Image: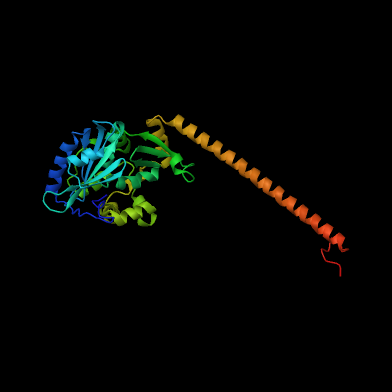
Amino acid sequence: MGGKAFAQGPSPLSTPRMDPELYHGLLKNFRAQLATFFDRVASPIEAPEKTSFGDIDLLVSGPRTEPLDIQWVGQALNAMRILRCRPLYSLAVPRPDLEGSFVQLDVHVCKAEDFEWRLFHQSHGDLWNLIGSSIRCFGLTVNDTGLHLRIREIEPKNRKRSMIFLTADPNEVLDFLGLEKIAYQKPFDTVKDMYEFACSCRLFWPEAYHKSDLKANDRKRMAKRHLYEQFVEDFVPKRQSTVRSSEDATKPSREEVFAEALETFSKREEFETRLREWRNEQDELDRKHGTREWRKEQAMEAIAYTDAWINFLTCTTQGADPKSNKRAG
């Protein structure tokens, strides 16, 4: 939340940004305290070259007491206020160096089976935003649940139904995208290093970052995320002016990536079943639509027939020629 969760409402709290020394000291302290309440506690790897921090993020799983009572955690941390938006809890903890000010601690409560993926996905700040814009062109989506493959035929009508879950194993994702695992497991020294890592993805596609072709979410991201904006407006264009043009010509097509993903993650049967069910549903909808149209036509013909008879009877009663539809003088 960028440290602004408590800045709203009738009684806002001051949560000034933290310098690296204060941030890392508090992070270590909070991790130790939360370890008394949860089996696993970890913090995502930070983005490089940060000179200040708006909040502190910690992922936790396996509460040592059930059900979890976040009030106990808040009391242990001397939290002034707690905001609940499950599975995220934001706590306003007093700053040790600035009286009357607070630190925003965001505690993300994860299921045990989701913990590793969430930690992986949230690491390195905007990295997955950078990579995501490119792999989207190949029908792939990475989100907070894992790597997914989108079925082109279904996607325009129902994006959620179009997505086939592939894996939530970090190593499998890095392998499939051609990204170096060792480099991912430690902080990048510089922003440039992180940018180069994103571009090392075997599905990096520079055209995905042309400003005129950006999706609405990407344009919003550019307005809010400086690292993403800098990557799109500066780094990618400069890189393209120096790399060999043949580099991008070797990229596979979306169809080739689709087939490869189905085989790599053994998802062909699921894909064929999903597509068959979708087509059957669409055929049924078409039949229903056709039946409705036929009934509509029948109803309109019946109305026209009834109007004609009313007209005939009216004209006959008045002694007029029914075909003329004129009243007798």
Q: Is residue 198 left or right of residue 321?
A: left
Residue at 16 percent of width and 42 percent of height: 27
Residue at 24% in and 36% down: 60
- Residue 268, image x and y in percent? 44, 31
Give above or below for 302 relative to 252. below
Say whether residue 201 is left or right of residue 93. Answer: right
Can residue 134 be seen?
yes
Q: Nearer the viewer, residue 250 or 198?
A: 198
Q: Residue 277: give x, y in percent of width and height.
A: 52, 34
- The residue that appears at 83% across and 60% down in the rendered structure is 314
Q: Position of residue 203 (x, y in %)?
A: 34, 42
Residue 100: x percent and y percent? 15, 54
Colour convention of the picture: rainbow
> Of all residues shown, which one is farthest toward the bottom?
329
> Is 269 left or right of 146, judged from the image as shown?
right
Q: In the rendered image, is residue 179 in sight?
A: no
Q: Is residue 188 above or below residue 218?
A: above
Question: In the image shown, does 1 or 236 lie closer to the viewer?
Answer: 1
- At a point 55% along the width and 38% down the height, the residue shown is 281
**Image vertical order of residue 243 relative to residue 315, above or below:** above
In the image as oriented, which residue stretches furthest toward the right? 319
Labels in figure, total = 0
Q: Quadrant of the C terminus?
A: bottom right
